[in-house]
Amino acid sequence: MLNGFDKIINRLKMQEEFYSSAWEVEVASFYLNKGYQVEFIEEGKDKSPDLKITTDENKTFWAECKCRDIYTERDKKINKFWDDLESALLRNLGPNKINAFIIIKSLRDPEAKELDTLKTFLFTCINSACKSIKKIHSFIEPITKNYEIAITILSQPDEEITSSSLTFNLSEKLDRMKHSCDFQINQNNKPIIKNPIFIGFKNVKESDKVSGIIDGFKKAVKQLPEEGPGVVWIKVPDNAWNDNLEKSFLEAEALLKSKFTKGQNTRVNVVHLLTRLIHKIENEENNGLSYKPLVLSVENKNPKVNFLEN
């Protein structure tokens, strides 16, 4: 058994420790497959790295493993706002069979104190749209001047329509979309839907998909021995960069390189960012989801100790 692995097994049994310890095992397996020796470092009072690695040339370096939080504090607040608004809309639309297409765009970050006012305003607009069966396009909420809202009534309660009759031309990509409907196959073997609901949200400023990496990097540096050499592994949430992988990586690379030259950060030789790109497979042999792991490495050109992992 690997040195220290018994402690990892105990941590894997703890819910709050599972993901971080599983990530350490994943990184350790990477080096073991290269024929290196790996030791799991026991956590104590003093801060220490996760792994001690010895190469086949008997050279030693240290590795620290961090999981980047999927959301920043800002994004958590925004998602909570949209979650609460979405739930309120569904509770109103579903039981009343109000079949609507609703898009809400925030012109600045939404605030929790605006939620009740926005809900009341939306319900009023939805009821008005139901009476007139007309489209309401891109008007701004008059109290906070913070939201653009578009509402379209799609059909009458329990009216049977074909899926092909529902087409939406969106001028920009939404941050999230929720949809539901009753689905059935009619006597002519054609798909029919009833009571469709579509709710979409868009925030004027994108989610921060990169700065969480720097938070992980700063914490990792403090765990590494001052003399180095050190390697930092950061796990980026699955699909977090799917929409624009190259842009996200370039931003992360620039941020990390700007940190390498500062004080204790010179003990880091390289940062590896691991993400998994998940995609759908549909062919004659396979039907489901597949993922491809992707490692993006950022090297420190002027570390305290020159060292190559491989």
Image (cartoon, helix red, strand yellow):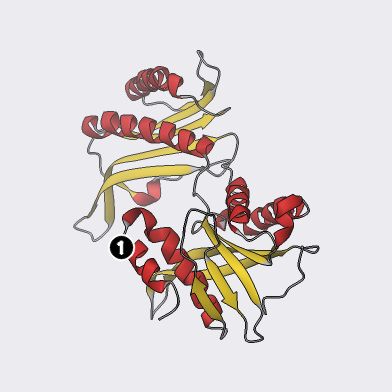
| Residue at numbered disc 1 | 13
On the picture, is 250 further left or further right than 167? Answer: right
Q: Among all residues in the image, which is located at the extreme top?
A: 143
Residue 124 horizontal/vertical position (percent): 36, 18
Q: Quadrant of the C terminus?
A: bottom right
Residue at 28% over, 45% down: 181
Residue at 45% over, 70% down: 25
Secondary element type, mark 1: loop
Q: Which is more toward the observer, 282 or 268?
A: 268
Q: Which is more toward the observer, 294 or 53?
A: 53
Q: Which is more toward the observer, 48 or 205?
A: 48
Q: Quadrant of residue 54?
A: bottom right
On the picture, is 131 further left or further right than 67? Answer: left
Residue at 76% over, 67% down: 305
Vertically, is 15 above or below 195? below
Vertically, is 121 above or below 253? above
Residue 137 horizontal/vertical position (percent): 50, 27
Res. 210 visible in picture: no
Res. 118 visible in picture: yes
Vertically, is 150 above or below 259? above
Q: Amino acid at mark 1?
A: Lys
